[in-house]
């Protein structure tokens, strides 16, 4: 076990580990416990009971923070020609369109916070996986950072994305994973709070009854429109999940639903 200093041990006494704190109480306590001369970082750690070694049990998400990141977000776009001009007009901080820029990043330059790419540039961007992957900056369809040129202005907007992508474990494996426990009205409330107006919610399931129930729960929420298949064009393609590959191998259908934040 790591050895702790006197200051840490002293402030740790202020935390009651048997008590549940409200968000307001927790923020106040964090400020009271800070003993550094600079603004420290606050991290949230969740114990979710998932096995990260199994792809179908991983949870990934991209959300817009209500008050930003507290700093200016530097957005880099991989685009060339007319696409680069669209990115420039949309406010991109950096634009990489040739091998010289690619080589600059391969040499270690990563002075940006968000990287976005158009599909035509992904062949060159793929060479940067070793550099950008370690810093979680690699553009991928799954996180909505590989987009068509016409979508660049929307995605570049402050470098924050209006899309949530979440992977849940299969709700039909065990009794405790039933629909009412996993995708419940409070979770729809959370999505509504995180998504800005115009944001998109994309849901897939290989269990039609589950898909219909989720579609009902979302559509009944006043913050979302009803299922609209035409929204698929705005969301674009995502890499298939482990579960989808399983469905393809077993010739099993996957039901897809699309919703927009009002």
Image: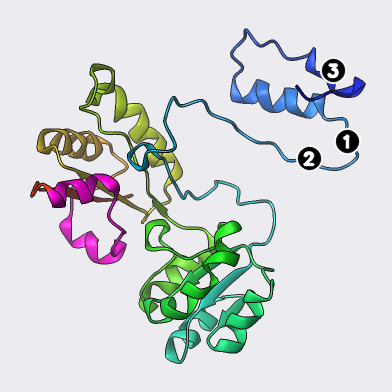
Q: In the rendered structure, find residue 40 and report the number of the disc placed on it.
A: 2
State which mark lies toward you, 1 or 3: 3
Rounded to the nearest whole Å, what is the CA distance between mark 1 and mark 3? 14 Å
Q: Residues within 10 Å of mark 2 (few under 14, many from 20)?
A: few
Helix, strand or loop at label 1? It is loop
Q: Nearer the viewer, residue 134 or 222?
A: 134
Numbered tag placed on residue 9 in the rendering: 3
Name above or below for residue 20 compared with residue 186.
above
Q: Earlier in the sequence, mark 3 or mark 2?
A: 3
| Real-space Cα separation, disc 3 to disc 2, in angstroms | 17 Å
> Can you tell which mark lies on residue 58?
none
Residue at 69% of width from left, 28% of height from top? 27
Give the residue drawn at x 31%, y 59%: 238
Residue drawn where x is 37% and y is 63% of the image:
141
Give percent across and percent down for residue 162: 43, 55
The label on residue 36 is 1
- Label 3 crowd bin: few (<14), some (14–19), many (20+), radius 10 Å: few
Query: Do residues under tags 2 and 1 come within 8 Å of each other at their CB atoms?
Result: yes
């Amino acid at each position: 076990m790591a050895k702790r200093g006197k200051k840490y041990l002293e402030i740790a006494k202020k935390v009651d580990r048997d008590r549940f704190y409200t968000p307001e109480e927790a923020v106040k306590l964090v400020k009271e416990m800070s003993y550094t001369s600079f603004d420290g970082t606050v991290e949230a750690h969740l114990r979710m009971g998932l096995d990260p070694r199994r792809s179908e049990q991983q949870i990934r998400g991209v959300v817009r923070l209500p008050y930003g990141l507290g700093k200016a977000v530097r957005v880099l776009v991989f685009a060339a020609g007319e696409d680069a001009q669209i990115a420039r007009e949309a406010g991109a901080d950096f634009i990489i369109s040739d091998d010289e820029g690619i080589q600059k990043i391969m040499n270690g330059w990563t002075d940006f916070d968000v990287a976005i790419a158009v599909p035509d540039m992904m062949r060159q961007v793929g060479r940067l996986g070793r550099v950008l992957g370690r810093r979680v900056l690699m553009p991928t369809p799954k996180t909505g950072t590989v987009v068509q040129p016409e979508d660049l202005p929307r995605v570049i907007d402050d470098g924050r994305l209006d899309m949530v992508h979440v992977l849940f474990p299969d709700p039909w494996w065990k009794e405790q994973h039933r629909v009412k426990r996993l995708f419940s009205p409070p979770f729809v409330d959370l999505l509504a709070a995180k998504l800005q107006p115009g944001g998109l919610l994309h849901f897939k399931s290989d269990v039609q009854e589950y898909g219909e129930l989720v579609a009902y729960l979302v559509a009944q929420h006043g913050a979302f429109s009803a299922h609209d298949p035409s929204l698929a064009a705005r969301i674009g393609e995502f890499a298939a999940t482990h579960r989808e590959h399983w469905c393809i191998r077993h010739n099993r259908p996957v039901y897809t639903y699309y919703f927009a934040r009002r």
